[in-house]
């Protein structure tokens, strides 16, 4: 495992707080770990190992592909693939854009309060939660990870895409969020186009898009292999 020593700048602290609270609506009194009896901690099925590929189609844009690394984050990848295969993400939206930081969405309710109560949370596969996940040790442009609350084991469906490789992104996310995939430079051009077109609507607190009519729509996410 990678050992992290952080001296956060004020900007990095702000971004970390932003990501933690906006992810799924954490309460300030939440503990770092949820009840282990209610958290999915084991991966099973065809997506629990190996490398897979998810194709994301946003309305009005070319599809882009996420390469998924189940050998690093088996529970996260299996959960994401199962949701995608079930059609869960079809018609959901990206509800948050922070320029130079992330594009986030993928939950019913299309807001930070939309943590789906019908689904169990999954274990947070990252260093600070005592899980070895090299992909989560160094966030860079195009990394895809699960959003969460202040509770480490609280992620369900919401995911985010990092938009840059910067010190603030690294200090805010490294070892603290379950990275599970990567988008290559060519396909990040599509993500950049989405961000460029919709950033003007992200005027709410911590980059929230307040009007659902102004949110990018996920037509579908399919798993290729």
Image: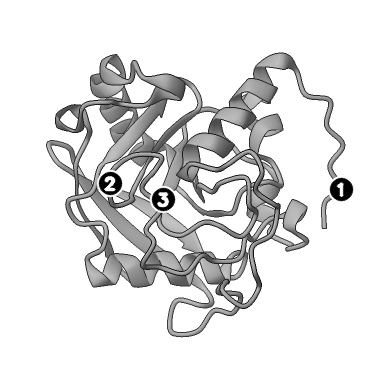
Secondary structure at numbered mark 3? loop
The mark closer to the camera, 2 or 3, is 2
Q: Judge by depth and name the residue closer to the eye, 44 or 140.
A: 44
Compared to residue 51, the image places residue 32 above or below, namely above
Q: Is residue 217 left or right of residue 13?
A: left
Rate crowding at label 2 as few (under 14), some (14 to 19) or many (20 or more) other CA atoms within 10 Å: some
Q: Quadrant of the N terminus?
A: bottom right
Separation of marks 2 and 3 at Cα, in angstroms: 11 Å
Q: Mark 3 highlights which residue?
A: 158
* Number of numbered labels in the structure image: 3
The mark closer to the camera, 1 or 2, is 2
Q: Mark 1 highlights which residue?
A: 3
Secondary structure at numbered mark 2? loop
Mark sitting earlier along the chain (2/3): 2
Q: Mark 2 highlights which residue?
A: 109
Q: Position of residue 75 (x, y in %)?
A: 54, 71
Decide: marks 1, 2 in contact (CB < 8 A)? no
Q: Judge by depth and name the residue closer to the eye, 162 or 201.
A: 201
């Amino acid at each position: 495992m990678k050992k992290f020593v952080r001296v956060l700048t004020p900007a990095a602290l702000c971004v970390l707080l932003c990501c933690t609270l906006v992810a799924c609506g954490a309460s300030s009194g939440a503990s770092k770990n949820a009840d282990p009896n209610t958290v999915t901690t084991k991966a099973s099925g065809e997506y629990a190992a190996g490398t897979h590929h998810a194709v994301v189609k946003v309305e009005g844009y070319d599809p882009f592909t996420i390469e998924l690394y189940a050998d690093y984050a088996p529970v996260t990848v299996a959960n994401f693939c199962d949701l995608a295969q079930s059609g869960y993400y079809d018609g959901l939206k990206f509800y948050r854009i922070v320029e130079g930081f992330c594009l986030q969405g993928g939950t019913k309710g299309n807001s930070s309060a939309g943590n789906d109560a019908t689904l169990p949370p999954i274990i947070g596969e990252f260093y600070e939660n005592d899980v070895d996940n090299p992909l989560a040790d160094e966030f860079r442009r195009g990394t895809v990870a699960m959003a969460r609350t202040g509770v480490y084991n609280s992620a369900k469906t919401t995911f985010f895409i990092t938009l840059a490789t910067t010190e603030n992104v690294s200090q805010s996310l490294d070892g603290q969020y379950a990275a599970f995939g990567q988008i290559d430079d060519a396909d990040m051009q599509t993500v950049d186009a989405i961000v460029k077109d919709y950033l003007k609507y992200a005027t709410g607190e911590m980059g929230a898009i307040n009007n659902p009519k102004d949110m990018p729509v996920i037509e579908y996410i399919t798993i290729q292999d």
